[in-house]
Amino acid sequence: MINEINPDVYISTEDIAARTKEIGNAITKEFRGEEVVVLCVLKGAFIFCSDLLREINLPTKLEFISLSSYGANTESSGNVIMEMDVTSNLEGKNVIIVEDIVDTGLTMKFLLGLLEQKKPKTLKVASLLHKTSRTQVPITVDYLGFEIEDKFVIGYGLDYAGRYRELPYIGVLNAGN
Ligand code: 5GP
């Protein structure tokens, strides 16, 4: 039987929306007069990316890339593989990677290396969350939603064992869950 579980709210829907609007405005300001490619990292970033895209007031193109880190459950192993590549040429484009969370930084380091080979004009990182205390590889997050503590978070696209992506807020599983 599947229990109905309501994880504790860690970052509210309203706070996410307000911060996403600010990030959209910052991107709009920085790239005024240019086109940007918004690159959504599947699966976790799909909700943040769809909200952020609608806060960017510029000509945009949307691309997807799918990465998977294997070997561990709630921790990145650093063994990242690309499951699905982008479908258009990124050479000479302003690319903004949109990620759900930067934890150790290993996934983003892998992705930056991969994308640099595609010779974009600019390459920026937008991430909703950053667990700075867990950094193994320092990553510059150009557009950051929230710096968070070392907690395993779920919701707003982020999963635990494939579940909870539909929660409208960022939550934490409490002891009872
Ligand atoms: P990193 O390579 O930076 O350690 O980890 C990045 C990936 O690990 C994220 O894209 C995400 O898939 C997963 N991850 C790291 N921390 C969390 C977390 O607190 N919650 C969830 N759901 N995924 C996480």
Image: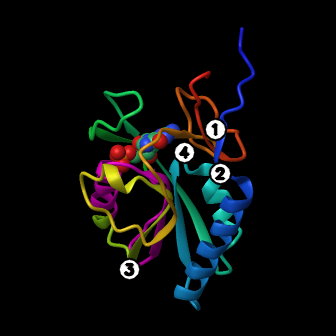
Q: Earlier in the sequence, mark 3 or mark 2?
A: 2
Q: Which mark is residue 121?
A: 3
Please tell me in which quadrant of the rendered image residue 115 appears: bottom left
Image coords of residue 72 (percent x, y):
34, 28
- Mark-to-mark CA distance, 4 and 3: 26 Å
Q: Do the residues bearing badges 2 and 4 touch, measured as CB atoms within 8 Å?
A: no
User: Is residue 149 left or right of 134 when viewed as pictured?
Assistant: right
Specify which label sits upstream in the sequence, 1 or 3. Answer: 3
Give SS at disc 3: loop
Q: Residue at x 47, y 54 (%)?
A: 148
The span shown in magenta is 86-115
| Number of residues whose C-alpha sits closer than 10 Å to that of mark 4, classed few (under 14), some (14–19) or many (20 or more) | many
Q: Is mark 4 within 8 Å of ligand 1?
A: yes
Q: Label 2 is placed on what type of residue?
A: Ile
Q: Look at the numbered disc 3 and say if its residue's Cβ is closer than 8 Å to ligand 1.
A: no
Using the image, determine if residue 38 lies above or below residue 67. Answer: below
**Secondary structure type for disc 2:** helix
Decide whether residue 98 is among the magenta residues: yes
Mark 1 and mark 2 in contact? Answer it, CB < 8 Å: yes
What residue lies at 36% left-to-right and 56% top-to-bottom? 132
Residue 84 seen by the camera: no
Q: Which residue is mark 4?
A: 44
**Quarter of the image where ligand 1 sits:** top left
Q: Indicate the quadrant where residue 108 lies.
A: bottom left
Query: Between marks 3 and 2, how big is the CA–CA gap?
Result: 26 Å
Total residue callouts? 4
Q: In the rendered image, which residue does mark 2 sit on?
A: 47
Disc 4 to disc 1: CB gap under 8 Å? yes
Residue that label 1 marks? 165
